[in-house]
Image (cartoon, grey):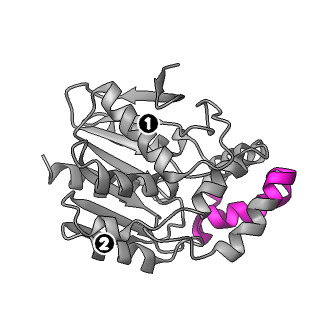
Amino acid sequence: MPTIDVNGTTLFYDDHGPKDAPVLVLSHSLFFDQKMFVHQVEHLAKDIRIVRYDHRDQGQSADSGLLSVDMDTLTEDAAALIETLGLGPCFFAGNSMGGFVALRLAARRPDLIKACIVLGSSGELEYKLAEFSPLIDGISKEGTEPFIDTLMYIMFGDDYLADVSRETERNYWRDYMLKLGPNIARSAHGVIHRKGVLDELKGSKVPLLVLAGEQDHAYSVSLSKNIAEAVVDSEMFVVPKAGHSVALEQPEIVNQYIADFIAAHP
């Protein structure tokens, strides 16, 4: 399986679709890996080159040993990945934590980014710090198992959690999260203690598509509106019946938004 050494770590990635097509790099959420974008690969890779990767300390990428995996480091990792693979300027999409990376790339490395897509994300300080801090502290000591129901509620919307037809997929991710050890708390610590990026975005000229989940239990729709309002060239949509994991929960809707956005920015 392909890996690449960048920014002092080793990242796992995969590469789908025509090599001469527009490039879309996909950046996953905390508690997931690149497979959360399985539906995007299945339905978009015929016409779009899709590169998915695992953040350091998650998925199949290397353990960095950092006590807190901060968003600036993850942004530098993503920039180095794009540069080393020769992907830029590219489209870059991120869900939640991946969205934090996308926004920072748009603000800091417009030379690498043609346009950005953020899903279920925020440009602000963690507004649920008091709620999430005890959860992350508990995970750092006991792993995810005692908190799995809470994690599933945070990461998915009500419709997805109740949909019998999605049970197999839902159980896959439940099992995946159950296997995460206490070290995942180091990545989570970086997420909840991140700095805001809205002020940096105010001068950004990178086109931005913002997608919010109607049923997002982690980040309210208002946070997505704040992102869109910070960037002049932006558009925002609320995805019905989607929770925090927007790309995974409502792939048909999200895929159409992505395809239309890429087509509009040749």
Label 2: which residue? 228
**Of the residues shown, which amino acid type is indicated by label 1?**
Arg
Residue 227 appears in the figure = yes
Main SS class of the magenta portion in the image: helix
Instruction: Give 66 or 221, whichever is nearer the viewer.
Output: 66
The span picked out in magenta is 138-164
Q: Earlier in the sequence, mark 1 or mark 2?
A: 1
Asked which quadrant contains residue 254, the reply is bottom left
* Image position, residue 87 (x, y; %): 28, 32
Provide the residue designation for mark 1: 52
**For numbered disc 2, what is the local secondary structure?**
helix
Is 109 rendered above or below residue 119? above
- Which is more toward the observer, 264 or 192? 192
Where in the figure is residue 228, as x and y percent of width and height? 30, 72
Residue at x 26% of width, y 70% of height: 202
Residue 21 highlighted magenta (yes or no): no
Front label number (1 vs 2): 2
156 in the magenta segment: yes
Residue at the (31%, 52%) spot, across then down: 108
163 to the left or right of 178: left
Figure quadrant of residue 194: bottom right
Q: Residue 79 falls in which quadrant of the image?
A: top left
Disc 1/disc 2 C-alpha distance (Å): 24 Å
Q: Residue at x 51, y 55 (%)?
A: 97
Measuring from the top left, give residue 203's x and y in whole percent. 22, 66
